[in-house]
Image: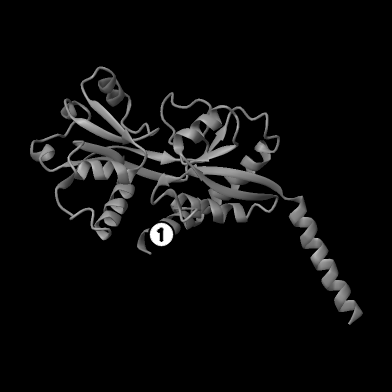
């Protein structure tokens, strides 16, 4: 009996020492980008969140907490070097040089969805065929491309931004904007939620063209003076992410989440 108690004490001591040796890390995610990354009932969830939760559980040197934050606020924080990493930014040309992007987590298809009346005439070129329209966009999202941004700057397209996908789609349903640009999965998921809530009847909107395909990352702060563990954390993260890609686990998580 004494030997058993001694063994149990040794095991408890081992686990205790392991937990104390873990470096605490907080990673921030967009709190308003369902179904990918959002806060629900005070808890951060979504497809990216589930992927990262499973990944970080395998990094025994670190105790990782995932927290949701408004996107624009997080962008300011990572630019200032106040937070280590943020998900899921896109890697766009000359965009956000204050973040490092290495291995993408997921591919996202950026589409334009419009009121039926808007698409009653052919609009097959982006953004040339959308001049004179009011386009909705999530605050802090840069998904329309450089040519689109140039047309907005010149006043040929009016841009209206709202905090999240739900608000933009409600504006579109009510005719306050002509079109909305975002990821196809996010749009379809949110429209389904609005139908369940009786806020959308399933008619009046149509998908336009695909603008481009982008990839979501875990972006790491370039300004990293506050994070001496960054290099090791990033190395372990990329190793685990690569393994999840090779095993097909990430695709399985995506399908499981969308079908539940």
Query: Which image quadrant for residue 19?
Result: bottom right
Q: Is residue 123 above or below residue 243?
A: above
Residue at 32% from the left image edge and 49% from the top image edge: 185
Give the crowd class for mark 1: few <14, some 14-19, many >=20 residues within 10 Å: few
On screen, residue 108 versus residue 242, left or right, reads: left
Q: How many marks?
A: 1
Residue at 53% from the left image edge and 27% from the top image edge: 98
Residue at 78% from the left image edge and 60% from the top image edge: 16
Query: Which image quadrant for residue 213?
Result: top left
Spot occupied by residue 2 in the image (x, y as percentages of width and height): 91, 79
Q: How is the image coloured?
A: one colour
Examine the rendering and report whether any part of residue 183 can be seen.
no
Q: Secondary structure at mark 1?
A: helix
Residue linked to disc 1? 257
Spot occupied by residue 115 in the image (x, y as percentages of width and height): 16, 42
Residue occupying the far bottom of the picture = 1
Residue occupying the far right of the picture = 2
Q: Is residue 246 above or below residue 10?
A: above
Spot occupied by residue 240 in the image (x, y as percentages of width and height): 58, 50
């Amino acid at each position: 009996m004494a030997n058993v108690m001694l063994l149990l004490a040794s095991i408890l001591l081992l686990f205790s020492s392991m937990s104390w040796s873990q470096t605490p890390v907080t990673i921030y995610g967009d709190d308003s980008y369902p179904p990918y990354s959002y806060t629900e009932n005070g808890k951060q969830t979504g497809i990216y969140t589930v992927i990262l939760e499973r990944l970080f559980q395998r990094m025994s040197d670190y105790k990782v907490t995932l927290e949701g934050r408004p996107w624009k606020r997080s962008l300011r924080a990572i630019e200032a070097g106040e937070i280590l990493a943020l998900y899921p930014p896109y890697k766009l040309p000359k965009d956000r040089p204050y973040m490092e992007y290495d291995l993408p987590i997921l591919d996202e298809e950026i589409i334009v969805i419009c009121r039926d009346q808007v698409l009653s005439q052919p609009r097959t070129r982006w953004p040339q065929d959308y001049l004179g329209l009011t386009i909705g966009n999530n605050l802090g999202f840069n998904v329309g491309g450089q040519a689109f941004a140039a047309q907005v700057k010149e006043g040929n397209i009016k841009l209206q931004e709202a905090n999240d996908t739900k608000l933009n789609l409600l504006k579109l349903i009510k005719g306050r904007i002509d079109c909305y640009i975002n990821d196809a999965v996010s749009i379809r998921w949110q429209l389904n939620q609005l139908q369940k809530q009786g806020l959308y009847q399933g008619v009046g909107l149509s998908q336009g063209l695909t603008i481009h395909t982008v990839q979501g990352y875990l972006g790491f702060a370039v300004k990293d003076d506050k994070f001496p563990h960054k290099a090791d954390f990033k190395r372990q993260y990329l190793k685990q992410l690569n393994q999840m890609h090779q095993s097909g686990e990430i695709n399985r998580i995506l399908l499981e989440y969308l079908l539940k």
